[in-house]
Structures are given as C-alpha cells and as structure tokens.
Image (cartoon, helix red, strand yellow):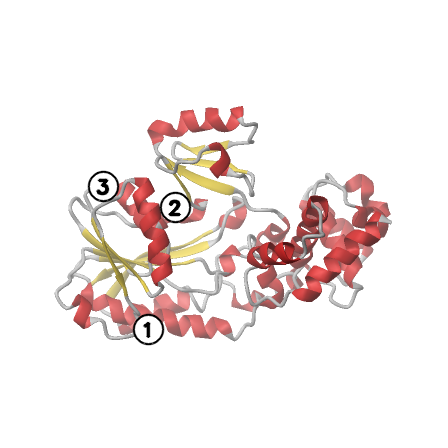
C-alpha cells in the first residue's frame, strides 16, 4: 500500500535525524544519498517530517504515526494518505481553520495540550500572547521581500505572470508563499532583498543621520546593514562577524545590491579588539546578537523537538558579554540598537535590564515584534542611548 510506503520513508528520515544540523540541510544530504527515492517520495517525506516537528512535545505518549497524522492534519489544507488512514473521521474538516482543528483534536484526544507544543512557556517574554503564539506553529510562515519602491509594481507584475500568489504588505514589502523559487523568476537581487517582515520592522529603531558612521557588529549576511543603507544611503559602514564565510556571503549580497563603500573585519567580540578598533568611534551600533533563534522556529520546527533549555542562559551570557565589549566604541548621546530573533525573556528583557544596570546606556524604547500574528518571525528590539 502507498500509505505504508510513505510511512516507512518518514520513519527512516526521522530515525536518521538527530537535530544537530538544520533540517533542510539534513534533507538535502539525505535525499542525495538515497537516490532511489523519487520526487513524490521526497515531497511527502519532507511534508511529513516538517509537520511532525510542528507538534513539538504534545501527545508524546501516543503512537508516533498517530502523532504524525494529527500534526499533518493541523498543518495542512490538503489531505494526505496518513490523515485518510489514521484520522478518517476528519477528512471533511481538512479546510477548517487551525483554531477549529485544534478544538477537534482536543475533543478527540483530551490529553492534547497546546502549551506542550512549545514547552519553554515559562521563559517567554511577557508581551507574547501565548495562545496565538502556540497556534502559529501550525501555520507555514511566508517568504517576505523588501523591495525598492520604484520597482515594486514591476515585481508584482512579474510574479503574477509566473502565477505566484503575491500580497502587497506595504509600498516596500511583499509576501509570497514559502518555498517560492525566486531565483528562477527574478534572478537579480538588485532591486529587492529577501528579508523577514519583522526584520524589516527593526529599521524603525535605527534613525540614522546623514553621514553617520555605523557598526553592524554581528553582521552575518548583512540584512540589517542593507536596511540601514536604504534608510540613509550616506551612512558609512563597518561590518564585522566572527565567521569569515558569513562576511563572504555578505560581500556577494552587497555587490548585487550595489553597496560598494564599506569596511569589513573578522572580529571575535568576546575578545579585546582594541588593536583593530582603538581609533574607531561610531554614531550608531547595531547589535543583532547571537541567540536561540526561538522566534524563527516556525521556519525551523525541528527546534521545538530538539532544543535544550539550558542553552538559553548560554546565549544570555554571550549577549551581555558582547554588549559590554562594544559599547566603548560608541560616541556619547548615540544609539546602540539591540536585536534578537528570540522569544525568551532571558535574552530580551533580562539582557536589557543588565545593560541598563551595568553599562553607560539609557533605554529609549523596546518592543517585541510579534511576527506570529503576520506569518513572520518574532523578534525583540531595544534602542539605547549612550550617557
């Protein structure tokens, strides 16, 4: 039977995966090594494994394949053989909303608790509405583009001609279905950037001035720097990261976006960097800190299953150490913008409290950017001014 074939493929993938690398990378390698799997097998195995992890630790005492059927039912608007076989009573309800489906599952399986989807609930930032946040894990996040205003109408036209569902969020932001193969439709990224909606909203906290000199100190692939540059093209930039390969990716991205004037340095911000930075003074610092990434787990649901809570304190200590080491390079009365893609208060409000208590920085404003309401990542941002 086909359903048994699909279940066996899912079980083999699940058994082979241990959470030590991102699921999408593991699947790429796994499918390459198992060439006997056809495109249909790969597609269903991918759908099933992602659906399965979206259930987190809920219903752990139930049979694995029943848990798969329940998660697949909650996550999708199209039937699968697993749903038809294990939950035939719900075949006609496949198009209901997530909230309605959760009510059906709770009624049928009273041991189902939504809070066990995300078991780290005691660590959540206070502003997060838990019910909405938990429900968001059963909804695939969108792919967001930040687009130059002069190009957005042309891009919408191109996407519609390619029969891609596109939603205009603002005059600079588009939302597309996750998994859209943009490189085949719009190969050049000269006029747009792939950037999550919440990440785009962090720009509201930057407030750069003409000819400012800013430091993006944990730049990664440079998304925040590109956002800053688009807000104020005259800004001078230093970008740094501890990973040289990230800066190589940044360099390629900057080149395609037409950003040519910047400096880059490989820096470990846990060390003393006075030898490299002794003469630097910045008009603004973006500290997009290394973090748990818990606000992005809607895109990487395997973390619901494999994340260890003890890592939260590790990241919190990392964040305070980095903040303490970079603030001395900031001019007086100038901003430090602290950002995480975390939902944990230890990485967000607790770090803010530590910064205010221990560093010459005054909190101006902070916010949880609630991406779970917009099919986007959830982020935290705080703007400080150096006293």
Residue 236 in view, yes or no: yes
Q: Crowdedness of circle 3 by 10 Å Cα count: few (<14), some, many (20+)?
A: some
Mark positioned earlier in the residue sequence (2 or 3): 2
Q: Position of residue 164 (x, y in %)?
A: 55, 31
The answer to whether the residues at label 2 and label 1 have Cβ atoms under 8 Å apart is no
The answer to whether the residues at label 2 and label 3 have Cβ atoms under 8 Å apart is no
Q: Crowdedness of circle 1 by 10 Å Cα count: few (<14), some, many (20+)?
A: some
Q: Position of residue 240 (x, y in %)?
A: 28, 60
Residue 303 picture quarter = bottom right
Where is 221 relative to 195, above or below?
A: below
Mark positioned earlier in the residue sequence (1 or 3): 3
Residue 204 in view, yes or no: no
Q: Nearer the viewer, residue 35 or 352?
A: 35
Which one is closest to the eye, mark 2 or mark 3? 3
Residue ID at (54%, 39%)? 180
User: Disc 3 marks which residue?
Assistant: 233
Where is 140 relative to 33, above or below?
A: above
Q: Nearer the viewer, residue 172 or 39?
A: 39
Residue ID at (22%, 51%)? 262
User: Disc 1 marks which residue?
Assistant: 321
Distance from label 2 to label 1 (Cα)? 26 Å
Residue 151's disc is none
Determine whether the residue tagged by mark 3 lies in a helix, strand or loop. loop
Q: Position of residue 154 (x, y in %)?
A: 41, 25
Where is 51 relative to 172, above or below?
A: below
Distance from label 2 to label 3 (Cα)? 18 Å
Which one is closest to the eye, mark 2 or mark 1? 1
User: Disc 2 marks which residue?
Assistant: 201
Which quadrant of the rendered structure holds the C terminus? bottom left
Determine whether the residue tagged by mark 2 lies in a helix, strand or loop. helix
Q: Crowdedness of circle 2 by 10 Å Cα count: few (<14), some, many (20+)?
A: some
């Amino acid at each position: 039977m086909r359903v048994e074939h699909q279940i066996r493929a899912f079980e083999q993938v699940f058994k082979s995966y241990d959470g030590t690398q991102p699921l999408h990378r593991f699947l790429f390698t796994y499918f390459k090594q198992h060439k006997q799997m056809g495109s249909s097998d790969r597609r269903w195995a991918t759908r099933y494994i992602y659906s399965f992890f979206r259930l987190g630790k809920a219903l752990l005492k139930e049979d694995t394949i029943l848990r798969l059927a329940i998660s697949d039912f909650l996550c999708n608007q199209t039937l699968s053989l697993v749903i038809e076989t294990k939950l035939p009573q719900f075949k006609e309800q496949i198009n209901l909303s997530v909230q309605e489906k959760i009510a059906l599952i709770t009624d049928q399986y009273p041991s189902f608790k939504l809070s066990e989807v995300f078991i780290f609930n005691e660590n959540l930032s206070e502003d997060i509405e838990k019910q909405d946040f938990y429900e968001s894990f059963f909804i695939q996040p969108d792919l967001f583009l930040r687009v130059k205003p002069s190009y957005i109408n042309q891009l919408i036209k191109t996407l519609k001609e390619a029969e891609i569902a596109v939603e205009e969020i603002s005059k600079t932001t588009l939302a597309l279905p996750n998994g859209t193969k943009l490189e085949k439709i719009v190969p050049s990224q000269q006029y747009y950037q792939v950037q999550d909606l919440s990440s785009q909203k962090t720009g509201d906290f930057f407030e750069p001035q003409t000819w400012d000199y800013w430091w993006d100190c944990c730049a990664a692939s440079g998304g925040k720097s590109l956002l800053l540059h688009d807000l104020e093209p005259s800004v001078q930039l230093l970008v740094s990261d501890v990973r040289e390969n990230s800066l190589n990716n940044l360099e390629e991205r900057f080149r395609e976006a037409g950003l040519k004037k910047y400096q880059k340095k490989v820096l470990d911000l846990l060390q003393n960097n006075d030898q490299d930075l002794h003469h630097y003074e910045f008009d603004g610092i973006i500290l997009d800190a290394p973090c748990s990434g818990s606000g992005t787990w809607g895109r990487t649901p395997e973390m619901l299953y494999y994340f260890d809570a003890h890592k939260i304190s590790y990241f919190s200590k990392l964040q305070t150490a980095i903040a303490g080491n970079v603030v001395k390079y900031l001019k007086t009365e100038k901003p430090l913008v602290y950002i995480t893609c975390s939902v944990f208060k230890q990485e967000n409000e607790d770090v803010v409290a530590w910064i205010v208590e221990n560093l010459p920085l005054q909190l101006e404003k902070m916010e949880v950017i609630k991406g779970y309401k917009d099919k986007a990542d959830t982020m935290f941002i705080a703007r400080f001014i150096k006293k």
